[in-house]
Amino acid sequence: MSEPPAIHLQNVSLTRDGRTILDRLDLDVAAQGITAVIGPNGAGKSVTLRVIDGLIRPDAGTVRLSPGRRAFVFQRPALMRASARANVALGLVSLKLSRRERLERVDAALARVGLLERAADAATRFSGGEQQRLAFARAWAMRPDLLLLDEPTASLDPAATETIEGLITEMAGAGTAVLLVSHNLGQVARLADETVVLAAGRAVERGPTRSLLFSPRTVEARAYLTGELPWTSFAAAS
């Protein structure tokens, strides 16, 4: 990398209940673009995101992030029992914005995900897919330097997925470093510049996304991708 990474993990280890979850994990994430993390269930992908965000403290190792704002969109959105507008505004509390700037940014974010007409509705009344779109609106409004995504479209229909993928691409194009965990390998192929394969808590392979997906070098990556054969229908349509 020509500039310092947005995320630097070195020898990060984590054990819970006698089980090794992260095993001396080394991972650098570029300060620009989209990096995807893939791998089998139990590989440590979601835990890695939580370690990066400070939600879980590792037993050992170095976790270093570049300065700046970050946002985290979980697979199951974390929302307040308040209106959609209030949920998006929450992410802007730490920013020194005028009231007018804050309201404009909130409404622009809601409009971007197709929820402006429901701005006054309680988030608890939204469907799972609408709540996920609302969580993305909050992240988009923050204009973060780093965006962490854990299976962000798992609960969305194809139209909403397309909207969210457009948002991710837009944010990355504006300079946000994106770290995406996804089992949707078609999505990874569409969005990610680089991809990392995790297995048993270690990064076993890394490379340009299409090269890694179609020509994996390691036994672990080949085993995982072979087990996900249905995704290759994306390749035939590309």
Image (cartoon, rainbow, N blue to C red):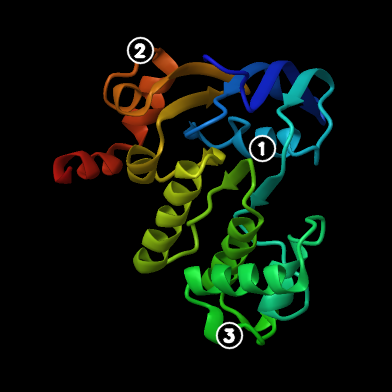
Q: Residues within 10 Å of mark 2 (few under 14, many from 20)?
A: some
- Separation of residues labelled 1 and 2 (CA atoms): 25 Å
Tell me residue 229's x, y (percent). Answer: 28, 37
Residue at the spot x=40%, y=31% of the render? 193
**Residue receiving disc 1:** 49
Tell me residue 100's x, y (percent). Answer: 71, 74
Tell me residue 211's x, y (percent). Answer: 30, 22
Is 78 above or below relative to 213?
A: below
Q: Residues within 10 Å of mark 3 (few under 14, many from 20)?
A: some
**Callout 3, which amino acid?**
Arg
Image quarter for residue 160?
Answer: bottom left
The numbered mark, 3 or 1, whose residue comes first in the sequence reads 1
Is 192 above or below relative to 237?
A: above
120 and 104: which is toward the camera: 104
**Callout 1, which amino acid?**
Leu
Circle on res. 217: 2
Where disc 3 sits, the SS reads: helix
**Residue receiving disc 3:** 118
Regarding residue 49, the answer to whether it shows in the image is yes
Camera-nearest label, 3 or 2: 3
Image quarter for residue 13?
Answer: top right
Residue at the spot x=48%, y=57% of the render? 153
Tell me residue 165's x, y (percent). Answer: 42, 53
Camera-nearest label, 3 or 1: 3
In contact (CB < 8 Å): disc 3 and disc 2: no
Camera-nearest label, 1 or 2: 1
142 and 11: which is toward the camera: 142
Residue at the spot x=49%, y=25% of the render? 196
In contact (CB < 8 Å): disc 3 and disc 1: no
The numbered mark, 1 or 2, whose residue comes first in the sequence reads 1
- Separation of residues labelled 3 and 1 (CA atoms): 30 Å
**Callout 2, which amino acid?**
Arg
